[in-house]
Amino acid sequence: MAKLSKAEAKAHGQACDLLAKDVLSEDEKLFVLENWQESAKHINTIAGAFFTPVGLARDFSAEVSGRRVIDLCAGIGSLSFWCANRAWNEPPEIVCVELNPDYAAVGRKLLPEAKWIVGSVFDLPRDIGHFDFAIGNPPFGATPRDARAPRFTGREFELHVIDVASDIADFGTFIVPRMTAPFRYSGCPAGGWPETIKDGIGSGYRDCPTDLHAKLLAQTGIRLEPGCGIDTSTYRNDWHGVSVSTEIVTVDFIEARAARRPAQSNLFEEAA
């Protein structure tokens, strides 16, 4: 548990008071998103769980589309909240998966229209169905796991989650630590658009794949690609109790599944 400043403790207490209400207004939900401290009762450095800053979660929603969306390692639902509150012709069906029941309890107050599953992303219900989009801000790095993904064997928790997502969604967008992304965009000079070349075309991203990405591609067929150009460094100091360098990666899971067939089976395929 982190030691909060007096101002943080006061605001967290006010957020807890709001959560005692049956129904929250939109302004009250925003106050909770900004001020409920995940580390007040939990040791988040061990779990590797830090909630997405409000501004970053709002920007992140621009990457998401589709009728069915699943939020893996959802926390209190920051990413899903902003996805749900975009100007959709018809609001999407959202499923949030969160292991920590305290976080899920908060999330249900912020996003009651979502279906909340309290459990591990590595033990999803067999009837969970298929999704247009998977999203997430999973725990980072060599965080302890209760299981592993079906294919990826590395230590990076976030890549295990992305591997799981590849079996249940067509596309995905995730927040990952900067060292996990095979490119550099956030915080780059010239407004985030350095003079770089990728595949002979000026892409605006510094392409820097590593052995990790070669392993990910070989084991899963997954390629981590840049999105629409969100500079996450703008929000680096807005995380609770930590300053994190991140990137937003996008994934075409249809392409990944095609690349690994027929050698590898789907997580939810019926046994022959």
Image (tube, helix red, strand yellow):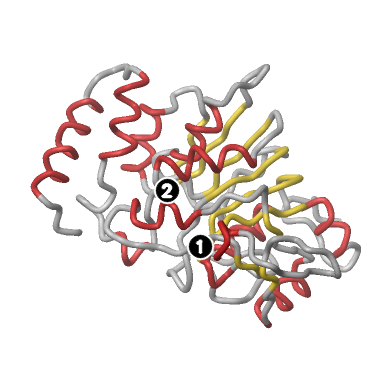
Tag 1 secondary structure: loop
**Mark in front: 1 vs 2:** 1
As rendered, which of 57 and 192 lies closer to the eye?
Answer: 192
Residue plotted at (48% across, 42% down) = 57
* Quadrant of the frame with the C terminus: bottom right
Q: Secondary structure at mark 2?
A: loop
Left or right: 239 in relation to 132? left
The relative height of residue 64 versus residue 40 in the rendered view (above or below) is above
Residue 18 as seen in the image, left or right of residue 238 = left
Q: Horizontal and vertical percent for residue 46?
A: 33, 67
Residue 104 vs 143, above or below: the answer is above
The quadrant of the picture occupied by the N terminus is: bottom left
Residue visible at 61% across and 38% down? 62
Residue 60, image x, y percentages? 55, 43
Residue 143 vs residue 83, the one in the foreground: 83
260 sits left or right of 216 in the view: right
- Judged left or right of residue 108, residue 232 is right
Marking on residue 34: none
Pinpoint residue 196: horizontal percent, then vertical percent.
72, 69
Q: Residue at x 16, y 45 (%)?
A: 8
Query: Measured along the vertical axis of the image, is residue 183 above or below residue 9?
Result: below
Residue where numbered disc 2 is placed: 52
Quarter holding residue 20: top left
Lower sequence index among marks 1 and 2: 2
Q: Amino acid at mark 2?
A: Thr
- Label 1 sits on what residue type? Gly
Q: Position of residue 136 (x, y in %)?
A: 54, 49
Work out whether residue 48 or residue 173 is closer to the camera in this orientation and state it. 173
